[in-house]
Image (tube, coloured by chain):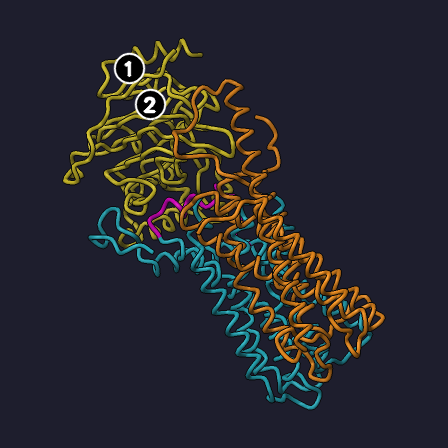
Amino acid sequence: MKVPSLRAQAAATVAALGAGFALVFFYAPLDADQGFIQKIFYLHVPLAICALLGFVVAAGHAIRHLRTGDPVHDARSYVSIHLSVIFGVGVLLTGSIWARASWGKWWVWDEPTLVSFLIVFLLYATYYPLRYAIEDRDRQARYASVFAITAGAFVPLNFVAVRMAQSLVHPRVFATAEGGLPGSMLFTFCVCLLGMSLLWLTLVRFELAAKSASAKLSRLRRALEGETYGPPSGSRIAPGVPSRAASPG
Amino acid sequence: MTSPEEGTGGPGARTHSLRAFTAILAKDLRVELRTLQAVPAMVLFAVTTFVLFRYGLDRTSLSGSLAAGVLLATVLFAAILAINRLFVPERDEGGFDAIRLAPVDGSALLAAKAAALIVYLVVLEAVALPVFGVFFLDTWTGVAPLAGVLLLTDLGLAATGVLVSQIGANSRARDLLVPLVLLPLLVPVMIAAANSAQRLLAAGGPSYGGIGKWLAVLALYDVTFLLVAYAVYDFVLED
Amino acid sequence: MGKLELEERTADSGSARRELADAVELSGVWREFGDRPVLRDVSFALARGGTLALLGPNGAGKTTLLRIVATLLRPSHGEVRVLGCSLPAQAHRVRGRLGYLGHEPLLYRDLTAAENLRFQARLYGLPDDGRGRIAELLDTVGMARRANELVRNLSAGMVQRLAACRSVLHDPELLLLDEPRSHLDPEGASLVEALIGRRPDRARVLVAHDIEGALGDSDNALALAAGGAVAYSGPSTGLSVGDARAIYGGAL
């Protein structure tokens, strides 16, 4: 399957997101109970789904990295987590805005999905200090992969536990997209989900391309600075995580 | 991961994992007994924290979810004290080299450290639980099954704690990093243990309604993280 | 100065017997830490029973090279064969057969000398926890009476002697020595020599700053500077140890 060019993919992303937002504002009906503010779900839920899938994808890359030792997979894992964490910030912000608009409080503990997400977010936020605390690039990548796999295993457990802890007195306040939505809402939701997924994938590709370019640049620079021979061919310095510059010497 | 070597006992053969496990566990327990670094600190921390809660909550009697929360939060943070210190002897003495050089499977190290941690936690709980009862509980009938719940919790703490501690052992700022990574991972354990404990510590005596599913979650967590730890230990152990 | 070429080794026919293979063979080994190459394209061979002196100024990569041979580090590129097994894939086969005496004594400070050796013996699967052997080794280095002292109470020289015992406890076929005489007074050095000295059934790689002493004790020499090999006298080249010394002297 031929991978579309980055430009084409970006264009598709813009188109999908544009269509999605247009649908949200002009097509999807107002929710009877919650009114206009309910529309924030078209942003909130797709962000959450993409972020969570992103964490799973990162775990997959991490497994491949441990098996093959190829730093490319580590870079993919890092970028996946990076973007999912950013999307996660969006999830929490939109969730908070919704809570404020509906309940008057900036945070509610009653929504198990949101709470689970907070915990997952807190966990993945430690990915960065973990990486930067390990100087040796090889070990850093390995431990990061171990973390990504562990955290990936943790996510479903976490959702199960939090959901079970939910007191049955408080009803679920978010309507799920799967059940009981009128067709127009479902359609709008799907388009938004598509747009968000494309956004995630496109941003991942952008970031990987940028890393690859900067790695090539630093290799060229080293070659120009008089390193007359480098490691044997077949061992490209694949896009790696930019480690904090170690002190010289 | 690796097959048994030809010629057991001959030069170069792998030492049997159980022998290695007992050797490392015995070494750790001997060092701990001699230096008394982890366990007394954990016990002291727990008792002091109970006193703090007595005043922070302005209560002299606890039951149900409040009792469960105080007990488990205290045990959790005391466990982190031990987890931080788990690999310190290896790190100080040249960073795992002695074990890496030996013909042993890395899982023996992992299992031995987890077992040592469980021993420390059991000793902690053997002291902290009665003290907790004396300080706060009106009825002790729930305490015995509670010990069982704590044991299941300890397994989960050990599996996750050893994994995170090993990752942190070779990093800078490991004292900060280990709790930071560990605490979110322990949320499901906390939830399941707290929900089990609150039923056992209910004001009118232990109730067992609905406790089964929480114990199942605890067990699921334990199994999942033991498996994950076993799957990745090789990658964490190598330099 | 150029890098000396090493003859191409004929590929393993697959039927190479362990007895005929060299103790150590390195071919085109690189090791990078992050972006920095610490070892560049290092190759050498060490025959069984022989001794290789590894020389070079500080930071040349000697310890890194030794750790790679000890299976503690993986090479970034290149091939490493130790005692007939290729690393890192078959590292588990050789670990029990090599001994390593590095900068760190690898001893637990809160255990006694004897307990440390007993722990080591158990890790290596020695019968009877190596009781007899431990007593014999401690006696050889003159620590029989200090056997039940905590390592943290021992002087640096004693610790080094104990570390030497630890490294040969399991009677390894290959001994890797990183400045084995550090912290030792002449008496200690000669006691330790009895443990780690030349033996026909044991190959050694020896890193030492005492160039004359090391070269006098070895069959081959490899000199490193900034991670690259600048001089090598090995069985396949015509250089003598004295020539290597001269080249090394010029590299400084």
Q: Are marks 1 and 2 on the same chain?
A: yes
Let me know if residue A51 appears in the view.
no
The chain in yellow: C
Q: Which chain is represented by cyan in the image? A: B
Residue B51 lies, in percent from the top left, at 75, 69
Comparing A48 with C88, the one in front is A48
Q: Residue at x 26, y 50 (%)?
A: B13
- Look at the numbered disc 1 and give the secondary structure of its residue: helix
Query: Going 32% across and 45% down the picture, which residue do you hit?
Result: C89
Contact, mark 1 vs mark 2 (Cβ under 8 Å): yes
Image x and y of residue A191, in percent: 64, 64
The residue at which mark 2 appears reads as C53
Residue B113 visible in the picture = yes
Residue A6 lies left or right of residue C137; in this view the side is right
Residue range in magenta is B86-104
Instruction: Identify the image quadrant of the C terminus of chain A.
Output: top right
Check the residue under mark 1 and report the chain it is in: C
Q: Is residue A60 above or below residue C178?
A: below
Judged left or right of residue C100, residue A119 is right
Q: Which residue is mark 1?
A: C241
Q: Amino acid at mark 2?
A: Ala
